[in-house]
Image: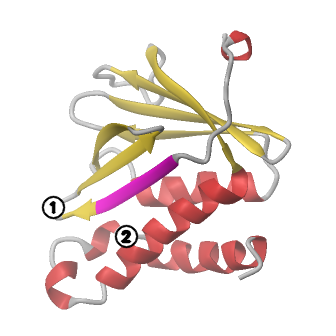
Amino acid sequence: MIDTLKMEQTDDIDILLTLNPHGWSTCFLVDKGKAYEFTITHVFSDPYFDLIQVLTSLINGQKFATLFWYGEPGGHRFEFTTQHDIILVSVDEFGETFDEEPKLCQLMFLFEIKLKQLITIFYLQLQKTRILLLDKNFAENRERDFPFQEFHKFERLVKQFLDL
């Protein structure tokens, strides 16, 4: 189905990823001026660890990767398909599920983005969170929800990938 849809590559995409207290996060994805909000629970998975794993796999040349961000109830599935240096991102939503991997997903939207742009945007959001967690007050009720060790490995890879 995705192959038959006419896609237009854009650089008019941004992401705001916020680590909230008590096991929640919020992600705003803005695509060509339209904002999408994702409320993410940390109960069913480690969303930051999962994100880092997906981004790492894309940097390492994997052609397809899937990320699940769970809400309560339901959640969202992000499918990343590599086409040279472009990533096709398909965002689906799913209802409440007790399966390990949701099977009934409904397409919300699609977009294309350069791999380096996607990595840069997410890396800077993760870096922002790591820096904010240096503050004791901010870190209270949050620090256990950020994978510091995995982030540091990812950061080394990103700096090499982006020639920073």
Residue at image position (16%, 79%) is: 140
Q: Write down the quadrant of residue 120 in the picture.
A: bottom right
x, y percent for residue 123: 54, 67
Dominant secondary-structure state across the stretch colored magenta? strand
Q: Write down the quadrant of residue 145 in the picture.
A: bottom left
**Picture layout, residue 88 above or below residue 145:** above
Real-space Cα distance between discs 2 and 1? 12 Å
Give the image's coloring scheme. Answer: secondary structure
Along the horizontal axis of the image, is 48 left or right of 153?
A: left
x, y percent for residue 155: 61, 77
**Picture layout, residue 128 above or below residue 75:** below
Residue sticking out furthest to the right:
84
For the N terminus, the quadrant is: top right
Residue at image position (19%, 89%) is: 136
x, y percent for residue 5: 66, 13
The span picked out in magenta is: 13-18
Which secondary structure, mark 1?
A: loop
Along the horizontal axis of the image, is 129 left or right of 72?
A: right
Q: Nearer the viewer, residue 49 or 82?
A: 82
x, y percent for residue 114: 70, 49
* Amino acid type shown at disc 2: Phe
* Amino acid type shown at disc 1: His
Q: How many marks are shown on the rendered structure?
A: 2
Which secondary structure, mark 2?
A: loop
> In the image, which disc is placed on residue 146?
2
**Picture layout, residue 127 above or below residue 24:** below
**Marks 2 and 1, the one that precedes in the sequence:** 1
**Picture layout, residue 89 above or below residue 50:** above
> In the image, which disc is placed on residue 22?
1
Residue at image position (31%, 19%) is: 95
